[in-house]
Each structure stands twice: as C-alpha cells, then as structure tokens.
Amino acid sequence: MSERTTDIVNWRALGWLGFYGLILLAWAATLRMALAPGNGGHGGHGGHVGGFGILFTMWALMMAAMMLPTIVPTLRDYNWLPAASGATRAGWWGLVAGYAAVWLPGSAAFAGAQVFLRQNGWVDMAGALRSPLASAGLLALAGAWQFTRAKAACQDACLSPMGYFLTNWRPGAVGGARMGVDVGLVCVGCCWAIMALAFVGGVMNLWWMGLATLFMVAEKLPEIGAPLRRPAGAVLLLAALAVAARGLGWI
C-alpha cells in the first residue's frame, strides 16, 4: 500500500470516528436535556418550559442526534470516490456541515411551532398535542405523505447518492458544503413529516426519538428503503384511525 493510499485510509477512518463521536455527543446532550429534573426527569414526557432559544437548542440537538445517522450512506459513497476527483477530507466534512446547516432552519421552524402551539394551549408542556383528533390528523398527514410523488422523489434521491455525485459533483470543501445543502434539502423533504410526529408522542420523548431514528435510517438503506415507504404509510394511517376513534370515544 502506497504512502498516499495509507494517508487516505487514515483520514477516512479518523473522519468516521469524528462523525460518530458527534452523533454520540448529540445523543448525550439530548438525553441530558430529556432526563433533566426540570423536564420531568423521566425521558418520557418532560415539561419543556423554556422560551424559543431553549427550544431551538433542544430541537437542534435532537435533529443532530436523529438526522446525522441518516447521511451515512451518502458519506460512504463519497469515500468511494477517487481523490483525484477532488474527494478530500475537507470536502467530506463540508458535506456534513452543509447537511447539518439545512436542519438548523428546520429546528427553528419546529421550535417556533412549539412556542406558538403552547401559547395557544394546543400542546401540553411536553409538546404533545392535547387534542386526540389533532394528533390523528398529524398521523394521517404523515401517513398520506408516504404515498405522494414528492416523498418518493425525495427518498429515491436519498437512496442513490452516487447518482447525485456523478451528475452534480463539486470538489473541495466549498463544493462538499454545497452538495451537503442539496442532500439536506432532499432529506428534509423525505423526513419532515416523521419529525413533526414529535407533537404526537411528545417532544424529546425517548421512545419516539429512538423509533423515529431507526425508521428514518432504514428508509435511507438501498436494500429496504423503497419497499418500506408505503407499508409505513399504511401503518401511520391505521394509527390515525385508532387515535381518532379513541378521541371520539368509539373504542
């Protein structure tokens, strides 16, 4: 193995270690907030009483913990590209940074929505919708989104990162960041409805966070992602019917 090849292998290995370290730190910070005494201390339905700044921090940490694992297939494909094409360590981290940057406005939007809903009495202190019918409506929206062409297009793009690189390649750190933004925007289109279900289970509900993360990671895996889309939508629609029926006192 040449010295240059060894250097490439080393920076890629170190890159993965740093990346997974970021995910672990994000999860650790999120768990600390979820389990804090002021948030109920049980990680199930903590009372999130902070203002927009605190809620934005909470959503940003939660987004990092939940969404960074979903970009692993894209980063893996980037690593397969030859160094001569401009696939560099800086470009790899630029891709991560561009992707993460897209979710910051998303965090702000969800935090703002939570503040608005709480001020109007539509969610409890855990961020969960008070009305079962509203929860059913959000579940139905997420389920219906799974059947749309927009969802299919976004997920197909997530499932073929190499195809994106071949047609939209930009070398170096700046190029990696620009591609990361593109990948992040597509990911938002794919995952926004699942993230919105936090208002059903309760924001920072650890059970919901774990299940949602596993689902969103699975949706990005080429082997099972596409076949999973519509069955998941059907499950969400059935859940919406069950929650609505319970809210109306039918069950």
Image: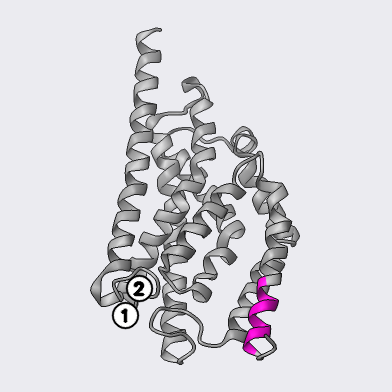
Name the one closer to the observer, 145 or 89. 145
| Residue 203 placement, left or right of 73 | left
Q: In the image, residue 15 lies at what x, y percent?
A: 36, 33
Amino acid type for the residue under numbered disc 1: Gly
- Give the vertical position of 134 relative to 157 (above or below): below
Amino acid type for the residue under numbered disc 2: Leu
Q: Residue furthest left?
A: 37
Give the quadrant of the N terminus: top left
Structural crowding at the residue carrying mark 1, measured as other residues with C-alpha within 10 Å and reported as few (<14), some (14–19) or many (≥20): few
Q: Mark 2 points at which residue?
A: 55
| Residue 63 placement, left or right of 78 | left
Q: For the image shown, how many numbered marks are present on the structure?
A: 2
Name the one closer to the observer, 225 or 9. 225
Q: In the image, residue 201 lies at what x, y percent?
A: 50, 73
Tag 2, which secondary structure? helix
| Residue 114 placement, left or right of 52 | right
> Residue at left 38%, top 83%?
125
* Image quarter of residue 118: bottom left
* Image quarter of residue 236: bottom right
Q: In the image, residue 26 lies at what x, y percent?
A: 33, 54
State the CA–CA distance, disc 1 to disc 2.
6 Å
Tag 1, which secondary structure? loop
> Residue at left 48%, top 65%?
208
> Residue at left 43%, top 77%?
112
Numbered circle sitting on residue 112: none
Residue contact between numbered discs 1 and 2, judged by CB atoms under 8 Å: yes
Q: Mark 1 points at which residue?
A: 51
